[in-house]
Image: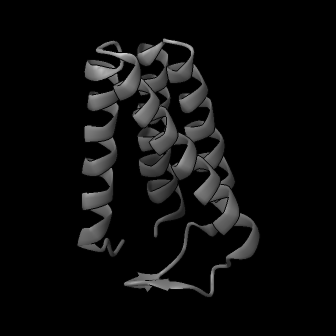
Amino acid sequence: MKIHPIWFVCIITRACLAYVVYRFGYVNKQIRYGLTMLLMGMGVGFLFKGYYGSNNETQIAPVFWHDTRYIHGLLYILASFFLMNGNPINSSTLIITDIAFSIIYRVMTDQ
């Protein structure tokens, strides 16, 4: 399995996002609203690229995970809804679920 270093950056970034949502999701409405919009934007972006993109893309390295974009999108949109409704614990749990899914998918497909 050949893993590009950017993948580790992606995993670490999503883990940090899960922590920020968990830690700061209760602070005030403005922070919660900003994080909700970020999660919703990421989710819609995944769905958009899932519909309009393909495995023929190259993002530093060839894209192998095109088929999972819908799953990533759904998880991030659900996380944004949980956060919008004042539940950052479930929201961050969905982000961690997305990270676990990414790792499992990578191992299972040996890519």
Q: Position of residue 42 (x, y in %)?
A: 52, 51
Q: Eyeballing the image, is 42 above or below 51?
A: above
Quarter occupied by residue 80: top right
Report the residue at 68% width, 57% height from top.
47
In this orientation, which residue lies closer to the viewer: 26 or 106? 26
In this orientation, which residue lies closer to the viewer: 30 or 12? 30
Left or right: 6 as drawn, with respect to 80: left
Q: Position of residue 99 (x, y in %)?
A: 41, 42
Q: Residue furthest front?
A: 30
Report the residue at 30% width, 74% height from top.
4
In this orientation, which residue lies closer to the viewer: 21 or 98? 21
Q: Colour scheme of this structure image?
A: one colour
Report the residue at 57% width, 85% height from top.
57
Left or right: 78 as drawn, with respect to 63: right
Q: Quadrant of the N terminus?
A: bottom left
Q: Position of residue 107 (x, y in %)?
A: 44, 56
Q: Eyeballing the image, is 79 above or below 56?
A: above
* Count of numbered circles in the view: 0
Report the residue at 27% width, 29% height from top.
19
Q: Position of residue 108 (x, y in %)?
A: 52, 55
Left or right: 58 as drawn, with respect to 74: left
Quarter occupied by residue 45: bottom right
